[in-house]
Amino acid sequence: MESYQAEIAAAAARLIVEEGLDYGAAKRRAVKQLGSSARGGLPDNHAVEAAVEEYIALFCAETQPQELRALRELALQWMRRLVRFRPHLGGAVWRGTATRHSDIYLQLFCDDSKAAEIALIDMGVRFEVRSVPGFHGERVDALSVHARCDALQENIGVHLLVYDQDDIRGALQPDDLGRRPRGDADALRRLMENTQP
Protein backbone atom coordinates (compact mmCIF):
# COMPACT_ATOMS: atom_id res chain seq x y z
CA MET A 1 0.00 0.00 0.00
CA GLU A 2 2.83 2.43 0.80
CA SER A 3 4.46 1.92 -2.63
CA TYR A 4 1.05 2.48 -4.26
CA GLN A 5 0.66 5.80 -2.44
CA ALA A 6 4.26 6.76 -3.21
CA GLU A 7 3.62 6.08 -6.91
CA ILE A 8 0.53 8.30 -6.85
CA ALA A 9 2.44 11.01 -4.97
CA ALA A 10 5.26 10.96 -7.54
CA ALA A 11 2.84 11.12 -10.48
CA ALA A 12 0.87 13.91 -8.77
CA ALA A 13 4.09 15.83 -8.08
CA ARG A 14 4.97 15.82 -11.78
CA LEU A 15 1.50 17.21 -12.63
CA ILE A 16 1.78 19.89 -9.96
CA VAL A 17 5.22 21.06 -11.10
CA GLU A 18 4.72 20.77 -14.86
CA GLU A 19 1.07 21.79 -15.16
CA GLY A 20 0.36 23.80 -12.03
CA LEU A 21 -2.48 21.55 -10.82
CA ASP A 22 -3.62 21.80 -7.22
CA TYR A 23 -2.96 18.81 -4.97
CA GLY A 24 -6.46 17.35 -5.11
CA ALA A 25 -6.75 17.52 -8.90
CA ALA A 26 -3.21 16.18 -9.32
CA LYS A 27 -3.92 13.16 -7.10
CA ARG A 28 -7.14 12.36 -8.96
CA ARG A 29 -5.46 12.64 -12.36
CA ALA A 30 -2.47 10.59 -11.16
CA VAL A 31 -4.82 7.76 -10.15
CA LYS A 32 -6.47 7.91 -13.56
CA GLN A 33 -3.13 8.02 -15.43
CA LEU A 34 -1.81 5.06 -13.48
CA GLY A 35 -4.92 3.11 -14.42
CA SER A 36 -5.73 2.29 -10.84
CA SER A 37 -8.40 3.20 -8.34
CA ALA A 38 -8.16 5.10 -5.07
CA ARG A 39 -9.13 1.99 -3.09
CA GLY A 40 -5.66 1.78 -1.62
CA GLY A 41 -6.06 5.32 -0.31
CA LEU A 42 -4.58 8.51 -1.65
CA PRO A 43 -1.35 9.92 -0.22
CA ASP A 44 -1.81 12.85 2.13
CA ASN A 45 -0.73 16.35 1.11
CA HIS A 46 2.50 16.10 3.12
CA ALA A 47 3.57 13.06 1.07
CA VAL A 48 2.71 14.88 -2.15
CA GLU A 49 4.60 17.99 -1.04
CA ALA A 50 7.66 15.85 -0.28
CA ALA A 51 7.37 14.33 -3.76
CA VAL A 52 7.09 17.83 -5.27
CA GLU A 53 10.27 18.89 -3.47
CA GLU A 54 12.04 15.77 -4.73
CA TYR A 55 10.81 16.34 -8.30
CA ILE A 56 11.99 19.96 -8.23
CA ALA A 57 15.41 18.93 -6.89
CA LEU A 58 15.80 16.32 -9.65
CA PHE A 59 14.35 18.10 -12.67
CA CYS A 60 14.07 21.83 -11.96
CA ALA A 61 17.03 22.72 -9.74
CA GLU A 62 18.46 25.09 -12.36
CA THR A 63 15.29 27.10 -13.02
CA GLN A 64 12.97 26.81 -10.02
CA PRO A 65 14.76 29.22 -7.63
CA GLN A 66 14.54 32.08 -10.15
CA GLU A 67 10.93 31.24 -11.00
CA LEU A 68 10.02 31.13 -7.30
CA ARG A 69 11.68 34.51 -6.72
CA ALA A 70 9.77 36.05 -9.65
CA LEU A 71 6.47 34.73 -8.26
CA ARG A 72 7.27 35.99 -4.78
CA GLU A 73 8.13 39.43 -6.17
CA LEU A 74 4.82 39.50 -8.04
CA ALA A 75 2.98 38.42 -4.89
CA LEU A 76 4.70 41.21 -2.96
CA GLN A 77 3.56 43.75 -5.57
CA TRP A 78 -0.04 42.64 -5.11
CA MET A 79 0.32 42.64 -1.34
CA ARG A 80 1.47 46.26 -1.50
CA ARG A 81 -1.47 47.18 -3.73
CA LEU A 82 -3.92 45.53 -1.34
CA VAL A 83 -2.21 46.43 1.95
CA ARG A 84 -5.42 47.75 3.57
CA PHE A 85 -6.88 44.23 3.40
CA ARG A 86 -4.01 42.70 5.42
CA PRO A 87 -2.95 40.27 2.67
CA HIS A 88 -1.18 37.03 3.56
CA LEU A 89 0.54 34.75 1.07
CA GLY A 90 -0.08 31.01 1.23
CA GLY A 91 0.28 27.99 -1.03
CA ALA A 92 3.29 26.86 -3.03
CA VAL A 93 4.69 30.38 -3.47
CA TRP A 94 4.85 30.76 0.31
CA ARG A 95 6.12 27.21 0.94
CA GLY A 96 8.83 27.49 -1.72
CA THR A 97 7.64 24.72 -4.04
CA ALA A 98 6.24 27.00 -6.78
CA THR A 99 7.35 27.02 -10.40
CA ARG A 100 6.31 29.21 -13.34
CA HIS A 101 3.16 27.07 -13.64
CA SER A 102 2.01 27.86 -10.10
CA ASP A 103 -0.67 30.38 -9.19
CA ILE A 104 -0.39 32.90 -6.37
CA TYR A 105 -2.85 32.63 -3.46
CA LEU A 106 -3.37 35.67 -1.24
CA GLN A 107 -5.77 35.66 1.67
CA LEU A 108 -7.38 39.05 2.35
CA PHE A 109 -8.99 39.94 5.68
CA CYS A 110 -11.73 42.56 5.30
CA ASP A 111 -14.43 44.28 7.36
CA ASP A 112 -16.60 44.27 4.25
CA SER A 113 -16.31 41.35 1.81
CA LYS A 114 -17.22 43.58 -1.14
CA ALA A 115 -14.50 46.14 -0.33
CA ALA A 116 -11.82 44.09 -2.11
CA GLU A 117 -13.98 43.89 -5.24
CA ILE A 118 -14.53 47.64 -5.18
CA ALA A 119 -10.79 48.22 -4.73
CA LEU A 120 -10.03 46.10 -7.81
CA ILE A 121 -12.66 47.95 -9.84
CA ASP A 122 -11.14 51.27 -8.72
CA MET A 123 -7.72 50.03 -9.88
CA GLY A 124 -9.17 49.06 -13.25
CA VAL A 125 -8.37 45.37 -12.66
CA ARG A 126 -10.55 42.78 -14.37
CA PHE A 127 -11.38 39.80 -12.19
CA GLU A 128 -13.63 36.78 -11.93
CA VAL A 129 -15.51 35.91 -8.75
CA ARG A 130 -16.07 32.33 -7.66
CA SER A 131 -16.71 30.51 -4.42
CA VAL A 132 -14.02 28.17 -3.04
CA PRO A 133 -13.52 26.19 0.18
CA GLY A 134 -11.95 28.29 2.94
CA PHE A 135 -9.71 27.41 5.87
CA HIS A 136 -12.24 25.09 7.51
CA GLY A 137 -14.33 24.06 4.50
CA GLU A 138 -16.60 27.11 4.62
CA ARG A 139 -17.21 28.85 1.28
CA VAL A 140 -15.35 32.11 0.63
CA ASP A 141 -15.19 34.41 -2.38
CA ALA A 142 -12.10 34.14 -4.57
CA LEU A 143 -11.32 37.07 -6.85
CA SER A 144 -9.13 35.74 -9.66
CA VAL A 145 -7.00 37.96 -11.89
CA HIS A 146 -4.36 37.41 -14.55
CA ALA A 147 -1.25 39.41 -13.68
CA ARG A 148 1.70 39.95 -15.98
CA CYS A 149 4.99 38.66 -14.59
CA ASP A 150 7.68 40.40 -16.63
CA ALA A 151 10.46 38.27 -15.17
CA LEU A 152 8.76 35.11 -16.47
CA GLN A 153 7.29 36.77 -19.60
CA GLU A 154 3.84 35.34 -18.96
CA ASN A 155 0.57 35.90 -17.15
CA ILE A 156 0.17 34.36 -13.72
CA GLY A 157 -3.08 33.57 -11.92
CA VAL A 158 -3.45 35.60 -8.73
CA HIS A 159 -6.30 34.44 -6.50
CA LEU A 160 -7.51 36.71 -3.72
CA LEU A 161 -9.46 34.74 -1.13
CA VAL A 162 -11.66 37.07 0.89
CA TYR A 163 -12.13 36.33 4.60
CA ASP A 164 -13.72 38.17 7.46
CA GLN A 165 -11.28 40.34 9.38
CA ASP A 166 -11.62 38.19 12.53
CA ASP A 167 -10.55 35.04 10.63
CA ILE A 168 -6.93 36.19 10.74
CA ARG A 169 -6.50 34.83 14.28
CA GLY A 170 -6.94 31.20 13.27
CA ALA A 171 -5.19 31.70 9.93
CA LEU A 172 -1.80 32.19 11.55
CA GLN A 173 -1.81 29.01 13.63
CA PRO A 174 1.00 26.58 12.73
CA ASP A 175 0.07 23.52 10.69
CA ASP A 176 0.45 19.98 12.05
CA LEU A 177 4.16 20.06 11.16
CA GLY A 178 4.65 23.29 13.13
CA ARG A 179 5.09 25.47 10.02
CA ARG A 180 3.42 28.81 9.39
CA PRO A 181 0.91 28.18 6.58
CA ARG A 182 1.02 31.80 5.37
CA GLY A 183 2.76 35.10 5.96
CA ASP A 184 2.28 38.82 5.53
CA ALA A 185 4.46 41.11 3.38
CA ASP A 186 7.12 41.52 6.08
CA ALA A 187 7.38 37.76 6.54
CA LEU A 188 7.63 37.30 2.77
CA ARG A 189 10.42 39.88 2.50
CA ARG A 190 12.36 38.09 5.25
CA LEU A 191 11.84 34.78 3.50
CA MET A 192 13.15 36.25 0.24
CA GLU A 193 16.21 37.69 1.97
CA ASN A 194 17.01 34.27 3.41
CA THR A 195 16.52 32.34 0.15
CA GLN A 196 18.55 34.13 -2.49
CA PRO A 197 18.70 32.14 -5.77
Image: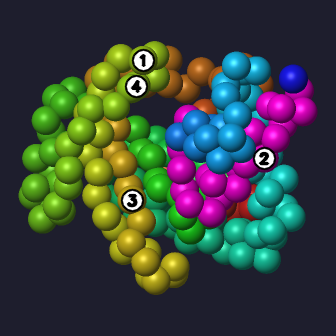
| Mark found first going from the N terminus, 2 or 3 | 2
Amino acid, disc 1: Gly
Amino acid, disc 4: Gly
The reply to whether the magenta stretch includes residue 148 is no
| Mark found first going from the N terminus, 2 or 4 | 2
Q: In front here: 182 or 129?
A: 129
The reply to whether the magenta stretch includes residue 4 is yes
Residue sitting at 58 percent across and 36 percent down?
28
Which span is picked out in magenta? Answer: 2-24
Amino acid, disc 2: Ala
Q: Name the magenta segment's main secondary structure.
A: helix
| Mark found first going from the N terminus, 4 or 3 | 4
Please give the residue where the numbered disc 4 appears in the rendered image: 134
Please give the residue where the numbered disc 3 appears in the rendered image: 157
Q: CA distance from mark 2 to mark 3?
A: 24 Å
Q: Dots 2 and 3: beta carbons under 8 Å?
A: no
